[in-house]
Amino acid sequence: MSKISIVAKVFLVIVGLAFLNVAVQAFINPQTVMDFVSVKLENTSARNSTRAFYGGVNLTFALFLIYGAFKMQKEALILASLYGGGFVIGRLYSILMEGQPSTFILTWLTIESFLTLGSLILLIELKKQKLL
């Protein structure tokens, strides 16, 4: 196993565990996830939607990224880059439209940018070494 393949595996497992952390928090108490952006979930439908997106979608992504770390690195890295890239695009558009967000959002923009770039760099390196 090459060094870059090991790095990709570790990267995907760490990202998967981060998604899993958000998913567990959202399932247990969806309000805790939304408190970071000062959104109150005042009805059953709001809590249901938060559990579905932040809980269910992140759980699915987490499981796939962890599985992909061992069995499908290319596909897992593509998913991670698309997911992170989508957030980056949405956050940058929002900054252009509405101005400076909170430090919390800027921190996530930084994390999502690194997720996107890291995934793309690993994809390129794995392809160079013909490991994909």
Image (tube, rainbow, N blue to C red):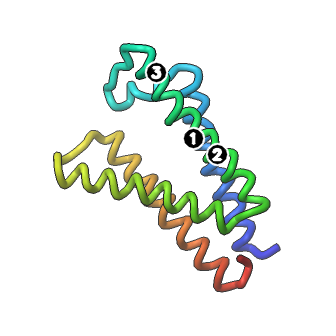
Which residue is identified by label 2? 62
> Looking at the picture, which amino acid does disc 3 mark?
Arg
Please say if the residues under marks 1 and 2 sit with CB atoms less than 8 Å apart: yes
The reply, left or right, for residue 71 in relation to residue 83 is right
Q: CA distance from mark 1 to mark 2?
A: 6 Å
Q: Are marks 2 and 3 in contact (CB under 8 Å)?
A: no
Q: Residue at x 56, y 40 (%)?
A: 57
* Residue 70 point in image, percent of width and height: 78, 59
Can you name the residue that lies furthest to the top here? 43
**In the rendered structure, which disc, 2 or 3, sits on the residue that comes first in sequence?**
3
**For the C terminus, which image quadrant?**
bottom right
Given the image, on which type of amino acid does mark 2 rest? Ala
Residue 4 pos. (x, y %):
70, 73
Q: Amino acid at mark 1?
A: Asn
Q: Residue at x 20, y 46 (%)?
A: 100
Identify the mark at residue 47; answer none if there is no mark.
3
Comparing marks 2 and 3, which lies closer to the viewer?
3
Pointer 3 local density, CA inside 10 Å: few below 14, some 14–19, many at least 20: some
- Give the spatial CA distance, label 2 vs label 3: 21 Å
**Circle on res. 58:** 1
- Relative placement, left or right, of 3 versus 32 is right
Numbered tag placed on residue 39 in the rendering: none
* Element type where label 3 sits in the image: helix
